[in-house]
Amino acid sequence: MNILFMGPPGAGKGTQAERIVDEFRVPHISTGDVFRAAMREGTPMGIEAKKYVDQGLYVTDEITNGIVKERLEQPDCAGGFLLDGYPRTIAQAEALDEMLAAMGKRIHHVIDLKVDRNLLLGRLTGRRICKSCGSTYHVLFNPPKTEGVCDKCSGELYQRSDDSEEKVGTRLDEYTTKTAPLLEYYGQKDLVRSVDGEQDIDKVTADISSLLRGKA
Ligand code: ADP
Ligand code: ADP
Ligand code: ZN
């Protein structure tokens, strides 16, 4: 099954993706995770991406499309994939359609996580990520058992530098102007299914799972 997760920053895409890939046994492809890994390693692509990510702006379509194309060609994507945070522009969506057509594939489901804008700032500033395994927590809404330590791998938790109050506004504006129009793009293909992302984490997972299983 080939799945896209859409929704503004903080909607819960990464949190839900971690759970859904366990259930559906497909690789989780997060362009944000790919950029952060490349930035950490200081690769040429990472150095270029950092210029944008640090400002809360989208990385160029050219770089982003190149990463996704390379990733989708890996053998583990043969049986399906979950794309989290890609595409985010119409140009990326068009590029994705071309890549998939060339591989004889298509998107089966677009899950749109709906969360009111006024809840997103609190979600993003309270977000903590594991340095070792990338698991996502929240200081209030999904705290680890021991403060600052990952439940799954005992890794150290950190706060993303772009999760600061000043960057969040820019990131939400990028989403509104460039990504929200994609709902229309995929809506025309009748692929979009909306999920109430303001519910408990477990309830959101259950709703997504039902939709993907064709039970809702
Ligand atoms: P995204 O990948 O869409 O940016 P995340 O999955 O990283 O979003 O979630 C953003 C923050 O909100 C994280 O700290 C996460 O723990 C928290 N969160 C995710 N889903 C919920 C939810 N349903 N209710 C409350 N907090 C949530
Ligand atoms: P969130 O879901 O909280 O917005 P991500 O981890 O998905 O965060 O993305 C972090 C940053 O990586 C974005 O703010 C942007 O700079 C860059 N990025 C991720 N995905 C894309 C994309 N599809 N197109 C352009 N930039 C992207
Ligand atoms: Zn961990």
Image: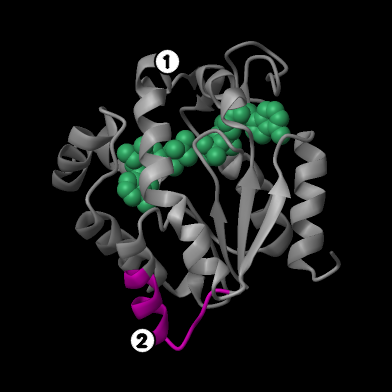
Q: Residue at x 22, y 41 (%)?
A: 49
N-term-proximal mark, 2 vs 1: 2
> Percent from the top left, x then y, of residue 119?
62, 24
- Does the numbered disc 2 mark a residue whose Cβ is under 8 Å from ligand 2? no
Q: Quick check: is 188 in the magenta stretch?
A: no
Mark 1 highlights which residue? Answer: 165
Q: Quick check: is 106 in the magenta stretch?
A: yes
Q: Residue at x 40, y 85 (%)?
A: 101
Q: Main secondary structure of the magenta part?
A: helix
> Percent from the top left, x then y, of residue 82?
55, 61
Quadrant of ligand 1 in image? top right
Q: Residue at x 51, y 77 (%)?
A: 78
Q: What range of the chain is rendered magenta?
A: 94-107
Q: Residue at x 41, y 69 (%)?
A: 72
Residue placed most toward the observer, 203 or 114: 114
Residue placed most toward the observer, 185 or 54: 185
Q: Which mark is residue 102?
A: 2
Compute the Cα span from label 2 to label 1: 41 Å
Q: Quadrant of the C terminus?
A: bottom right
Residue type of the residue flagged with mark 1: Glu
Image color mode: one colour
